[in-house]
Image (tube, helix red, strand yellow):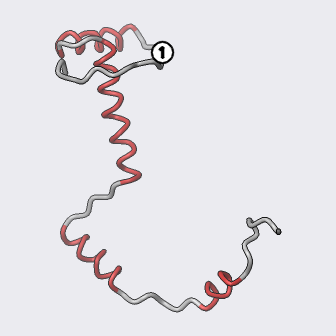
Amino acid sequence: MASETKRNRSERLEVRTTPEDRALIDRAVAISGTDLTNFVVTNLTVASRRVLADRTTFMLGSESLEAWERVNQRPARDLGGLRELMKRPSPFKRAE
């Protein structure tokens, strides 16, 4: 972690912990050879990316990927009701 590029940190983050959690974090910081700020920011960033990846990236195995591709190769269905709906003026467009 010592080779990280220095970034201008202007935002403050405060966290309350139990004494047990703080002791655990302090031990991990000491073992990692970095300071508390770098340790917390690095690990919170990694955890944040994992949480967001579940909402933006979907991993499929080869069998599932093939099934997905088969579905996407089908021709589009004709949905007459949708076509009519799309012809109507948008309720969100301002009248001029």
Q: Quadrant of residue 81?
A: bottom right
Q: Residue at x 67, y 87 (%)?
A: 84
**Quick one: which residue is furthest to the right in this view?**
96
Q: Nearer the viewer, residue 16 or 81?
A: 81
Quarter occupied by the N terminus: top left
Badge 1 crowding class, 10 Å Cα cut-off, few under 14, some 14 to 19, many 20 or more, is: few
Q: Residue at x 72, y 72 (%)?
A: 90
**Quick one: which residue is furthest to the front in this view?**
96
Q: Position of residue 38 (x, y in %)?
A: 29, 18
Q: Position of residue 9 (x, y in %)?
A: 40, 19
Q: Which residue is mark 1?
A: 14
On screen, 72 above or below 28?
below
Q: Quadrant of residue 41?
A: top left
Q: Residue at x 74, y 67 (%)?
A: 93
Q: Quadrant of residue 58?
A: bottom left
Q: Residue at x 28, y 13 (%)?
A: 24
Tell me if 66 is positioned left or right of 41 in this view.
left
On screen, 95 above or below 86?
above
Q: Count all numbered tags in the image, as a single digit.
A: 1
The amino acid pointed to by label 1 is Glu
On screen, 43 above or below 29?
below
Q: Position of residue 13 (x, y in %)?
A: 47, 18
Q: Nearer the viewer, residue 91 or 52?
A: 91
Q: Position of residue 52 (x, y in %)?
A: 39, 45
Tell me if 45 is positioned left or right of 64 in this view.
right
